[in-house]
Structure formats: C-alpha cells, structure tokens
C-alpha cells in the first residue's frame, strides 16, 4: 500500500499471492477451487484469467465448501491465472512502525485458521496473509521479532495448514520498505540524504538485499504458494535518497563521476534518476530470482507504484518496474487515486505488462486501510465490478482489529460482493475494445513534471476523464514500450501534453499517421527538449503542419469558434455556442499553420496592471483578451490526420475550472477523426462503459457501471476538498448503444433490465450498480 497523500505515516501492505497448487502439492487432492476452475478451460493468450460457464459455477456451488475433492489432474495454470477474487488479511496496530513490542494484546487473536475459514466462506480464490511488516514477523522467525501477542502461535503456518484442506492458495505478504524496529536495529541499511543524514528508509544498495533473501527463504519454508512483496519504493516524497557510501561508490563505478549534490535537474540529475531506477530494478530482479531458485513454483508479485500519482521519487518507471515478477499488483481506492481512476489504474497496469494478468488491491475501509470501518455493499460492488469489467483480478484488503478480531459485517459484505463476481465469471476478462489510445510519457512525467508531476498528470487524467464521461472506449499507450503494432490497435491516438518525445517515438508516430492513423496533440506536445528545456520549434512541426511561435505562460486560456456551418468546425465545435469565448484551462501555445488548416481562435487572458507588474498572482482565471492564434490545426499527412489543439481541453477537464464545453472539444475531435466507431454509447456521465470482444464467440459485451455517490457536506479542514460519499443506492438510468456492424442477438445479464432493440441500436433501462449487455454479431 502507499501512504495517505496528505496525512499519516507510511505503512506497508497489500497483498495477494500464493502458491501454485498448494493443495495438490500437499494433499495430492484436487480442491473445489481447482475443479471449478477446470470447469471450462480457456486459452490463455490475451485472456487474463479463466472464464467459466455459469453451469460450471452452479455445479461448484452445489459442492460443500469443506468437502475434499477426489484427486485429479491439475489445470496447468498457476493460481494467478485462474483467480478472480481473493483477500489480503493483516493486523492493525503496527502499521505506523515502532509499535510497543511489549503490548501483548496486539495480535493475540490473529488466527490463521479462522482467517482461512472466513475467506473460504466469502468465496475467495486465494488468500494473502500478513507475514512481515516493518516491525514484526507473523510467524516463527529466527531473523525478525515476532508480534508480541502471538505467543507460541504461528499464524502463517496455521494459515497454510488450514488452507490446504480448502485448496486455497496462500500468499505471504512481505514488506520491503517500511520504517520500524528492523530499520532502527540496522542503521547500516539506511538511506542517506546528500548531507549524510539518515532518512528513515532502506537503501537497496546497502546489503539489505541479502537480509531480504534470508527473510523470504524463512517464509517460503512455511509452505506458502508465493509472495506479495510490498513497498519496493524509494519513498513517496522528500527527503530523497540515496547518497550513502554504497550508492556513491556504485554511482562512481557506473558513471566515472561523483553523484550530483542534490536535486539539480541537470545532466547529472538525469544520471541520478537512471541510477535510482536501475537500483530498484536490480533489487526486484535479484529477489525474484532468489525466490525462484529456492522454489520455482512459488509466485512473486511486487506492489507497483509506477502509475500516477507516483513519479520518479518512488524509483519506478511505468514499464521498467512493472514486469519484474510473475505479474503486477497495483492498488486503487478513492482515498489515494480518486473514484474515476479505479478503471484507469487497471488499464495502466495492463498496458505496463501486456499479456499478463493484472491484480488490483482495494480496501474494505470507508476511508483507507486499517481504519476499522466497512463500506456499504453497493460501494464495494461498484469498485470490485469496475475492476473485473476492466479485466483485472481483485484483492480485497481487510485489516483486522488490534487483537486480530475479524469483523463479521465486513466478511458478510465482501462475501456477497464476491459471490456476485463469481456468478458473472464468464463475462469478465475478454479483450477490450478501445477506440482511443491515451499516451503516457514517462520522460515528460520526470522532466516537465519534476517535483510537481500532478501538473503533467492533469492532462493525462483529464483526457481519460473526458473519454469516460463521453463513453468513448480507451486504452493506454506507454512511451517506454511503444511499438508500431501497439499504435495500430487504436484508430485514434491522443498525446496529452506529451512535451518530451524521443526521435524513436516521433518516427513511430509519423509511421502511424502515414499508415492511416489519427493523432490528437494537446498542450506542449513535442515542444520541450530532452531535459525539459525550451525548443525553438516543435519536434512535431512537420507532422502537425504547424510552426511554433511561442508557448503561453498563462493557464487561463480561452477558445472561440466562428460559424459552425463551415467545414470541420461544425463537428469540432459541436455543443459550443458560436462566437462564444470559453475557458480551456491549461498549457497553450501560439501556432501558425504551415500545411495545417487553422480552425477557431485561441485567446490570451487579460492581465491586470498589477499582474503585469508582478504584484498580483495569476492562479485565478481572468477573462479573455485578444486572439493570438488558431485553437485547432488540422493536418492531413500520408493516409492519416493530425489534429493539434493549441490549448489543453484535457488539462481543463481535470482542472477545478472544468466546463463541459472544454471536454466536448476533445471528444468532438475523436468523433471528427473517427466518425463511425464500432460501438457508440450514450448514457449519463455517472455511468462508465467498458466494451470487450470475444471474437471466437463473436460476442461483444458492454459493461455498464453506475456510480451513484450522494453529496457530501463540508470537511473539517481543507475545505472544499472532500472525498466522495459512499454509494448506498443502486442507480436507475437509460443507455443507448449503436453498433457499426449488424447484430444477431442481444441480452442483458440482469433480468430486471429492460432491453429494446431496433436494428443495430439497443435501448436499455438499467437499475443496478452493474449490468452487462451481451451482443452476438
Ligand atoms: Zn544508498
């Protein structure tokens, strides 16, 4: 897990993992879970986990939960390729580190056997059990102090023993980076700042790796199926590391020069960033290989922090650090990522590890981990079913009471939600249908974002927000792993303020457009140098058919469109009043058309006399002054087109000064470039639509998820910044779906959904958090 954004100490957690065929290995019998999973094998390939017919599921339901099954052959699939839902269970009380080692009440009831029984009853496919945090081991360890209330008990072994009878894979949750008793006892492993001060984190070049190798070996000997290894980060903010003697020597050996004196954002800092990334990658790979050497069947996954809102400080790049284990695990949750990014996170993890299953961890607490509250069932269902619809498998994190008490209401609700997930098993995990590829530039994250990466993320996340609100199916493209083939999957590729692009990326983008692709550029895309310096001309000038006159310093920029009856303007400004200046907050540039067609106007904001004198800030938007260039430039090149926004409708959409018209600009551009999508969905903005295809069965699925949070009141601090309310009620709404190709048959999963069909158009009235429309073509 990651620390809260604004408060509280760091803690460690999340997990999921477990071992392959733990029951087969130990009992020689096939478990109920394996039988269920064998119900209908599905080719792995692009499918992220197995689908099963509902009949197989019903057959499984008739089997007693506790009944051992007859021995049969294994599926051949590791647990993480056949799992849908599982739980991570860990105690509450040492998560902030440095807890009282003499408080014998802590974990006195933390009982591995009871945890397994509760998880089995809750329809879990696997269990991640807390084995190590920054303070303690939760098993008999020769290396680490044991949680004080455990006495002679060993919850890890209890869990493994009990799970064997249920065919439940058990994964050990093991923290790498967390302050606590172990770090205090081992200052030789501690990170240093440039002045040599200890900064409360482990250094991965310090010899800590050898200690970790011994720790995982101990846990592996308990019979676990694998590891969920959390907190392989280098911190989530300043002070940054590491300038210890080990790191200084390794840096000098690598680069033949001394480390930079601090965060210098120059060539030396570029080397330092590479050094930090390489350090994390080396540590992950070495730990992975060590575990595989001890037990090739044991699985390993690292909790991932390569996605927004994380940046270079963590020491992870989106692709470089996602693929160093058997599969990636990431987190989501309104507490740290927003409600909207639940689906974004799943797709980001998928893009970072193509072809591998994606595990996403969520929590049962109302606010966050460890808070001892339980969300309403509909709130849990919304997040869980959203992730499943995006093709992830999901771990629900439960943090027990201080003494290890298990909240019965939590397990009841989780069980209800998981039962529903299992019942829809056949509908999860098919290939996504995506119309727009949203481009993420890690280089721009690092060198434009620097120490305020959210400024860059606004554009990326605003693009995502616009597409979700308008029900345009989307996917993620990552600069590190860009290929021609990945680009070609998307009819439209959107570069949200991708300011720093390599020659390789530009060449691939050029070939994509030449071949008939449609490119949308926003903000400063292509307009900064390799380390964020100004460029005289856009690196995309030729492709976009533009000349860069200047970048505007203002964010409160405006757009205006003339008569809508003329040419592309009629589509691009649909929903916007003629001759009406409207705020499109975000980075903007003055461009001249070379080969492109200019459309609309970009207007600078007024600046008061005091602002011009530097005596008044410019954070708050000011009204429109004069036009300085076109708002949009449209270029035809090869068989494709490039549409350049001189402004940032994506940034505007994510900003606090979001207006609907700014969002529409972006989606109008998509529709202009790609007028006949395979599926066109109309639904309320509170509904997220996810489209998948099963080409073998010629079946499209349209998942519809209704987000229905009630209004919140003012918070006790930081007004008006509040978390959304919890979803209590299922919404009722109407959606229409039009198909480009003829359809043969359409049904809804829910009997209560009223589905009407007219030719290639469906109309559905849905009451519920989730429904899926199943359409044969
Ligand atoms: Zn170091």
Image: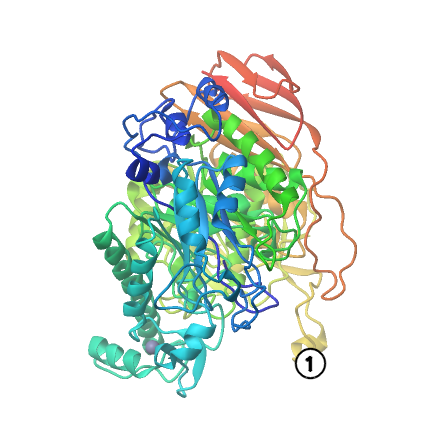
Q: Residues within 10 Å of mark 1 (few under 14, many from 20)?
A: few
Identify residue for label 1: 615
Quadrant the C terminus occupies: top left
Report whether 645 appears left or right of 726: left
Q: Position of residue 771 (x, y in %)?
A: 59, 27
Q: Is residue 519 above or below residue 294?
A: above
Q: Which image quadrant for residue 536?
A: bottom left
Q: Position of residue 648 (x, y in %)?
A: 55, 54
Residue at x 64% of width, y 33% of height: 769
> In front: 736, or 235?
235
Report whether 524 appears left or right of 269: right
Q: Which image quadrant for residue 493?
A: top left
The residue at the far bottom in this view is 195
Residue at x 42% of width, y 53% of height: 156
Report whether 38 appears left or right of 732: left
Residue at x 38% of width, y 50% of height: 478
Whether residue 573 is visible here, answered yes or no, is: no
Q: Position of residue 293 (x, y in %)?
A: 21, 54
> In front: 388, or 470?
388
The residue at the far front in this view is 152
Report whether 357 appears left or right of 118: left
Whether residue 293 is visible here, answered yes or no, is: yes
Mark 1 element type: loop
Q: Is residue 405 above or below residue 263?
A: above
């Amino acid at each position: 897990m990651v620390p809260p954004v604004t408060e509280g100490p760091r803690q460690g957690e999340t997990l999921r993992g477990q071992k392959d065929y733990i029951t087969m290995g130990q009992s020689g019998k096939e478990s109920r879970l394996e039988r269920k999973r064998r119900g209908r094998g599905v080719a792995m390939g692009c499918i992220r986990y197995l689908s099963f017919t509902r009949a197989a599921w019903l057959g499984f339901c008739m089997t007693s939960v506790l009944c051992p099954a007859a021995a049969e052959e294994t599926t051949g699939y590791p647990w993480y390729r056949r799992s849908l839902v599982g739980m991570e269970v860990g105690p509450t009380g040492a998560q902030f580190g440095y807890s009282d080692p003499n408080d014998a009440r802590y974990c006195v009831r933390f009982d591995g056997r009871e945890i397994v029984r509760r998880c089995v009853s809750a329809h879990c496919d696997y269990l991640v059990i807390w084995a190590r945090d920054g303070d303690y081991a939760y098993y008999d360890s020769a290396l680490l102090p044991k949680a004080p209330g455990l006495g002679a008990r060993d919850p890890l072994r209890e869990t493994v023993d009990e799970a064997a009878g249920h065919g439940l894979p058990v994964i050990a949750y093991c923290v790498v980076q967390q302050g606590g008793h172990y770090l205090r006892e081992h200052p030789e492993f501690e990170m240093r700042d440039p002045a040599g001060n200890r900064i409360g984190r482990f250094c991965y070049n310090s010899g800590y790796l050898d200690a970790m190798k011994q720790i995982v070996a101990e846990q592996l000997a308990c019979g676990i199926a694998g590891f969920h290894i959390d907190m392989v980060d280098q911190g989530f903010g300043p002070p940054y590391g590491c300038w210890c003697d080990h790191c200084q020597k390794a840096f000098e050996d690598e680069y033949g020069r001394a480390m930079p004196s601090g965060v210098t954002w120059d060539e030396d800092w570029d080397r330092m960033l590479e050094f930090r990334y390489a350090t994390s990658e080396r540590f992950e790979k070495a730990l992975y290989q060590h575990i595989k050497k001890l037990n090739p069947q044991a699985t390993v996954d690292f909790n991932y922090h390569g996605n927004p809102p994380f940046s270079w400080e963590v020491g992870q790049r989106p692709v470089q650090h996602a693929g160093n284990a058997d599969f990636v695990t990431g987190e989501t949750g309104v507490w740290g990522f927003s409600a909207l990014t639940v689906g974004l996170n799943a797709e980001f993890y998928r893009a970072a590890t193509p072809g591998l299953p994606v595990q996403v961890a969520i929590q049962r607490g109302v606010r966050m981990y460890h808070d001892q509250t339980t969300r309403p069932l509909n709130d849990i269902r919304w997040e869980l079913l959203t992730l499943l619809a995006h093709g992830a498998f999901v771990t629900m994190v439960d943090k027990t009471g201080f003494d290890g008490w298990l909240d019965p209401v939590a397990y009841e609700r989780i069980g209800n939600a998981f039962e529903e997930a299992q019942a829809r098993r056949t509908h999860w995990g098919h290939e996504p249908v995506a119309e727009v590829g949203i481009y993420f530039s890690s280089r721009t994250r690092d060198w434009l974002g620097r120490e305020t990466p959210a400024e860059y993320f606004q554009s990326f996340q605003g693009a995502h927000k616009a597409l979700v609100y308008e029900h345009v199916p989307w996917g993620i493209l990552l600069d590190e792993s860009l290929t021609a083939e990945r680009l070609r999957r998307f009819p439209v590729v959107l570069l949200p303020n991708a300011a720093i692009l390599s020659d390789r990326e530009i060449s691939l983008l050029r070939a994509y457009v030449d071949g008939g692709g449609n490119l949308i550029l926003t903000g400063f895309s292509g307009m900064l140098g390799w380390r964020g310096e100004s460029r005289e001309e856009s690196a995309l000038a030729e492709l976009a058919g533009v000349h860069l006159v200047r970048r505007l310093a203002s964010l409160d920029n405006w757009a205006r469109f003339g008569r809508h009856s003329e040419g592309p303007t009629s589509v691009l400004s649909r929903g916007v009043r003629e001759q009406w200046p409207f705020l499109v907050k975000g980075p903007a540039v003055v461009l001249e058309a070379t080969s492109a067609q200019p459309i609309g106007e970009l207007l600078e904001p007024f600046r008061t006399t005091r602002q011009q004198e530097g005596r008044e800030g410019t954070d708050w938007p000011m009204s429109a002054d004069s036009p300085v260039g076109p708002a949009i430039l449209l270029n035809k090149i090869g068989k494709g087109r490039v549409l350049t926004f001189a402004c940032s409708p994506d940034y505007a959409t994510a900003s606090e000064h979001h207006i609907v018209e700014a969002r529409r600009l972006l989606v109008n551009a998509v529709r202009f470039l790609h007028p006949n999508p395979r599926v066109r969905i109309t639904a309320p903005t509170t509904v997220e639509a996810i489209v998948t295809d099963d080409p073998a069965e010629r079946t499209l699925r349209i998942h519809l998820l209704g987000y229905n949070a009630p209004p919140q009141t003012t918070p006790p601090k930081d007004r008006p910044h509040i978390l959304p309310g919890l979803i209590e009620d299922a919404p009722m709404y109407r959606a229409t779906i039009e198909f480009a190709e003829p359809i043969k048959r359409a049904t809804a999963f829910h009997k209560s959904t009223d589905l009407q069909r007219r030719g290639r158009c469906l109309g559905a009235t849905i009451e519920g958090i989730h429904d899926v429309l199943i359409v044969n073509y």
